Image (cartoon, helix red, strand yellow):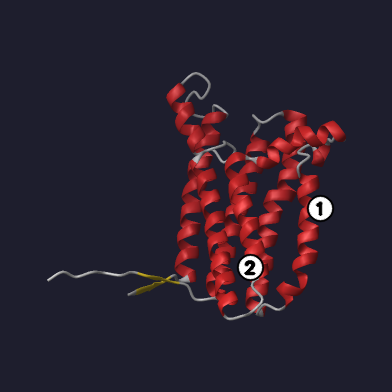
Amino acid sequence: MYINLKPQFFFKTLVIIIILLLIANIFSIATKLNFILDYDNQKIVRGISDKFDFDTEKSIPTMFSSIILFFSAVLLGILGIKDRKDRAKYSPWFGLSAIFVFLSIDEMIEIHEHLIPIIKMIKPTSGVFYYAWIIPYGIGLIILSLVYYKFLMRLPKKTLYLFMLSGFIFILGAVVIESFEGWEHQLNGKRTLTFCLMYTAEETLEMLGVSLFIYAILSYSSFSVKIESKTSI
């Protein structure tokens, strides 16, 4: 028996999860800024709040983001395997799969954050470049766009538009908003309502971008899971 992975069902499910996480994050922000409860002096409140805070490492939202990035990598890898069997050009799919595996790992252990002090040793940065990792990642993004331009142009128009839209949404959050987030961090610290709203928008856009990308991949090629059942007499 085969179970087809339906694009719309997957996308709607992911969006519902994102909305639930967003509501939990808003509650977390309200406690962290001491609008409700006592974040600083109640360990239990702080522990629960941090589990749903979009800006906290190893939180539930972070795990969710890492999982959907890795799931994207798996789907891209499957497309590469399919094209290799069909003797089509498959290496770009494997390349994208490797990139998403890296992004998934980066989401969990924050590799980009460890680059900041290294880059600042070479060239001090401030303002929108206060989070200095944006510089090498931005350069990498430009190079990646140039390398994959021809490959993307060969995709069906619907897939191309969905890839571009999902990429735009993701980059808007991960690079553009986070650059201003760094500026706010430098000026006023991380315990401000403005900073909290910024990272909420950033992470929400990232999750939505990846979810739309998964929808695009599932719409591009049919995916199904084979389930074998053994009956005994």
Residue at (54% x, 76% y) in the render: 221
- Around disc 1, counting alpha carbons within 10 Å, would you say few (fewer than 14), some (14 to 19), or many (20 or more)? few
Residue found at the very far right of the displayed protein: 123
Relative to 208, does residue 157 appear above or below in the rendering? below
Q: Earlier in the sequence, mark 2 or mark 1?
A: 2
For mark 2, give the secondary structure. Answer: helix
Residue in front for this viewpoint, 82 or 136 = 82
Q: Left or right: where does residue 66 sit relative to residue 6?
A: right
Quadrant hosting residue 187 = top right
Residue in front for this viewpoint, 180 or 126 = 126
- Around disc 2, counting alpha carbons within 10 Å, would you say few (fewer than 14), some (14 to 19), or many (20 or more)? many
For disc 2, the marked residue is 93
For mark 1, give the secondary structure. Answer: helix
- Using the rendered image of the protein, determine whether residue 124 is visible from the camera's viewpoint: no
For disc 1, the marked residue is 139
Residue at (54% x, 26% y) in the render: 34
- Using the rendered image of the protein, determine whether residue 231 is visible from the camera's viewpoint: yes
Q: Say what amino acid the circle numbered 2 marks.
A: Trp
Residue in front for this viewpoint, 179 or 229 = 229
